[in-house]
Amino acid sequence: MSQSLRIVFAGTPDFAARHLAALLSSEHDVIAVYTQPDRPAGRGKKLTASPVKNIALEHDIPVYQPENFKSDEAKQQLADLNADIMIVVAYGLLLPEGVLNTPRLGCINVHGSILPRWRGAAPIQRSIWAGDAETGVTIMQMDVGLDTGDMLETATTPIESDDTSASMYEKLAELGPKALIHCLGNIAEGNIEPVKQDDELANYAKKLSKEEAKIDWNSEAAFIERCIRAFTPWPVSYFSAADNNIKVWKARVEPAQGDQQPGTILQADKTGIYIAAAKDTLVLEQIQVPGKKAMSVQDVLNARRDWFEVGSQLS
C-alpha cells in the first residue's frame, strides 16, 4: 500500500466531481476542496452550488470558493493547508505560478486528451471533429503554460464511429479517475518519471461556438457528420430550411447521388433526408425543429414535409 497523500482538490463540473469521488474512495486524504463560486442556474437563476461542492459538503470537507488567486489572503489560505499536492480537474480558474508551487509536490492536472495533442479548452470535442482514432487523458505536472507541463501518466481509449462528445465525456470520466489514482500511487512511492511534451506535435483545441455549429454544405459529408457528433450535446449542428433553424442530432454518410450542388435535398423519406455535400451525401436521421424535441426524420416529415422538398436548396 502506497503512502497517503494530503490532497487539495480543485474542480467544478460533474467531470471533476467523478474524480473527487474516486479520491474519497482511495487511501489518500482530501483535506480541502476549491471550486468556483455558486452561479445562477436554471429558469429561476437561483444560485447553485457546483457538483464538486455538493460532494465535498456531503463528506464534511472544507470548501473554498475564491473568485481568483490574486489576493495574498487566497494564497495564504492555500499555504496554510500544508498540502502534499493539489489536483486540478476542470476548475475554470487560472492558477498563478505562486499557487502552482505552494503544495509540496506542486499541482497536477487531468486533461481530456493525449497531450501534446489538443491543448486547450475543448479537447474532447476537437478529437471527434478532427477524426482522431483515439483520445484519452493525460495527468500532467502543471506549469504556467496552457497544458504544457510534463506528462506523468496517459491512458487511451478508441473513438468509435458513433461516439459523440457526450459519450466520450462519459468514457473519459471513467478513464480519468482510474489513471489519477494509479498516478498518485506512483507519486507517493517516488516512482514517477515525468516526460516532457514535444511542442512541435502540439495543437490547440479552440473553444466551440454557436456560429461554428452552422453546417457548411460546401464541406465533405464525412466532416459534417463528425461535426454533428462533436457538437452534441452543445452547441448542436444546425442548418436553415423554410426560414427555420433545424438542429441535427444524428446523421450518416452515403455515396454521392449524381453531381448536385452542395446543399441540395436529393431525397426525403422514412430512410432519411439526403443532402448533397462537397463530397458524398449526408443523410439526416434525427433532427429537431423549433419548439419540438428531437425526433426521427420520418416523424418530422409527417408534419413538415413541405420544409424539405426534393430539389430545394438548404442554407
Image (cartoon, rainbow, N blue to C red):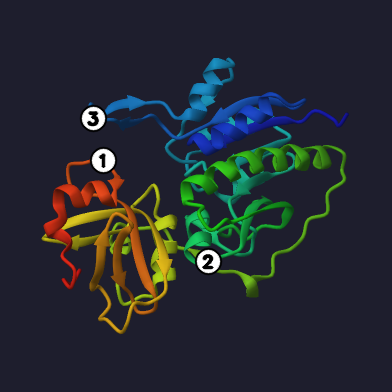
Q: Quadrant of residue 182?
A: top right
Which of the two discs, 1 and 3, sits closer to the camera? 1
Give the percent coordinates (x, y) of residue 180: 70, 41
- Measuring 57% from the left and 65% from the top, which residue is drawn there? 132
Give the labeled residue for mark 3. Answer: 43
Residue 95 placement, left or right of 241: right
Give the percent coordinates (x, y) of residue 140: 68, 52
What's the mark number on residue 234? Answer: none
* Residue 64 showing in the rendered view: no
- The quadrant the C terminus occupies is bottom left
Category of crowding for the residue at label 2, using alpha-carbon neighbours closer than 10 angstroms: few (below 14), some (14–19), many (at least 20): some
Give the labeled residue for mark 1. Answer: 293
**Measured Cα–Cα span from mark 2 to mark 1:** 28 Å
Query: Could you say whether the residue bearing mark 2 is in a helix, strand or loop?
Result: loop
- The quadrant the N terminus occupies is top right
Q: Give amino acid for label 2.
A: Gly
Query: Could you say whether the residue bearing mark 1 is in a helix, strand or loop?
Result: loop
Q: Give amino acid for label 1.
A: Lys
Give the percent coordinates (x, y) of residue 253: 42, 66
Q: Give amino acid for label 3.
A: Arg
